Image (cartoon, coloured by chain):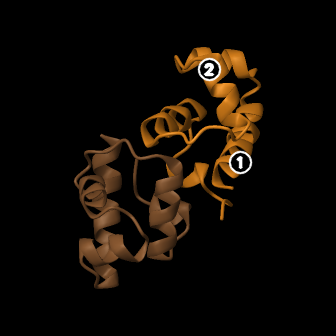
Chain colours: A brown, B orange
Amino acid sequence: MITNQLGERIKELRSKTGLSQEKFALSIEMDRTYFASVEAGRRNISICNIKKIADGLNVSLSELFSGIQ
Amino acid sequence: MITNQLGERIKELRSKTGLSQEKFALSIEMDRTYFASVEAGRRNISICNIKKIADGLNVSLSELFSGIQ
């Protein structure tokens, strides 16, 4: 499922920033519980929110999706 | 705006398939008017629908977002 793959990839990249879910969500002004559910693969997230997360992670959208089939 | 950039990229790749908007939308079982509004950059499209389009275009998500800032 694509939402799971994307959630895992976001979690991987967010972990590299050294920030907790809560602190990262705060840094991009996204609701903490919403962000947690995205990482858990439970959200059919929209492109605008995907972009917000990619920007917060300092990666391009192409990099964010790198390795996802 | 990311929706415009994505719409233009989808249009570029869809044009390469030689299919019209209508025929491409039909091939991926997506509503024709919805797909037209995605190409026009007017939809905050979700990851599941982005994946459906990428699959129809025979590109990875990373390729789909290639060149998009």
Q: CA distance from mark 1 to mark 2?
A: 18 Å
Question: Quick check: B31 above or below A46?
Answer: above
Q: Residue at x 48, y 34 (%)?
A: B49
Image location of residue A8, percent across then percent down: 28, 59
Mark 2 lies on a secondary structure that is helix
Which of marks 2 and 1 precedes in the sequence? 1
Image location of residue B29, percent across then percent down: 52, 16
Image location of residue B66, percent across then percent down: 63, 58
Q: Residue at x 50, y 77 (%)?
A: A58
Q: Residue at x 71, y 48 (%)?
A: B4
Residue type (three-letter) at the residue carrying disc 2: Ala
- Mark 2 crowdedness (10 Å alpha carbons): few <14, some 14-19, many ≥20: many
Frontmost residue, B43 versus B26 = B43
Residue B4 is labelled as 1
Residue A9: name its quadrant.
bottom left
Which residue is the site of mark 2? Answer: B25
Q: Chain of mark 1?
A: B
Mark 1 lies on a secondary structure that is helix
